[in-house]
Image: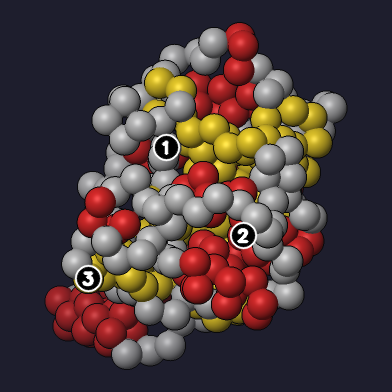
Amino acid sequence: MGITRGTTRLLLEESKRKPFGGSLLELGKMFVFLGDKDLSHWARVHQVELTPGVEFQSSHDPVLAAQGCLGDRYFFERLGFDEVTSLDAAPWEGADVITDMNLPVAEDLHGRFDVIFEGGTLHSIFHLPNVLANIHAMLRPGGRMIHAMTASHNQVDLGFYMLSPTFFMDYYRANGWHLEKVLLCEHVAYWIGGKLETGPWDIYEYTTGCLDHLSFGRYGGKQLSIFAVATKTEDSRCDVIPQQGYYQALWREDREARLAEQEARARKIASRSWLYDSAAYSAYKHLTERLRRSFLPRRMPPRVARY
């Protein structure tokens, strides 16, 4: 649960789109892996004015504080928030509210927040439907839910789940939220002295189906995280169970045309069964797939930034 350079720059871009203010809820008390000079530098790059006069606060983690890293409250107040509240299941990091998001939150938290932020918390909570219901309950209409550094690919055992971008796309659309963006954030992460660092982030705009051709092991070896922003409307809900976008698109296709296409493909395969059943062809396919995954370029959606 942390905020790196890439997350910071995406938050500054979101602030530029719609300035931050009011009350923020952090799901998990965030580690901030950068200092005040870094924040000021990136704010100038993105042409965002930080809030002046905020009392400085170092990281709650002594190792990060020794390296000049910022405290979470200071970081978010500089971004423009008037009130910053942190929520966690355990008290050991000093969160303001101690509650288990697997269970319904107390009613005094309902409708309290203008923005809810999670920077790698969602995938570590087991009961996702309850988490989403709690987010809906605590966020005011017109408020934003921001997901950042949510584990998606090549982050095994970082949490319970690695969530595909279609999870966010399909859930928020099905429940009447205004989905502002779903971005794929590809990076290589490493640790230096207890501080999380990453190489430059390649950031891609996600659309339904744009990764279908990479689904079966062809994505690659870098880590992939999700950055998503959704706005709650007066008509938003949390109880509609979505169907995956891939199948929604499939069901909209002309069934008779698809059956005819499949029958033609079946006849073609039957005519080549001697080839497909041979050990030599299987070895050829195995080799070409290994080469594809190791050397051939991937077809990715549009890259929108490199942070």
Q: Secondary structure at mark 1?
A: loop
Percent position (x, y) of residue 151? 39, 53
Residue in view at x 58 percent, y 71 percent: 40
Could you say which quadrant of the image residue 287 lies in?
Answer: bottom left
Mark 3: amino acid: Ile
The image shows residue 28, relative to residue 208, as above or below, that is above
Please report whichever mark, 1 or 2, sits nearer to the chain's N-terminal start: 2
Mark 2: amino acid: Leu
| CA gap, disc 1 and disc 2 | 17 Å
Residue in view at x 44 percent, y 15 percent: 103
Seen in the image, is 203 located left or right of residue 179? left
Identify the residue under disc 2.
11
Seen in the image, is 43 located left or right of residue 218? right
**Residue 274 visible, this angle:** no
Q: Secondary structure at mark 2?
A: helix
Identify the residue under disc 1.
28
Mark number for residue 192? 3
Percent position (x, y) of residue 302? 63, 78
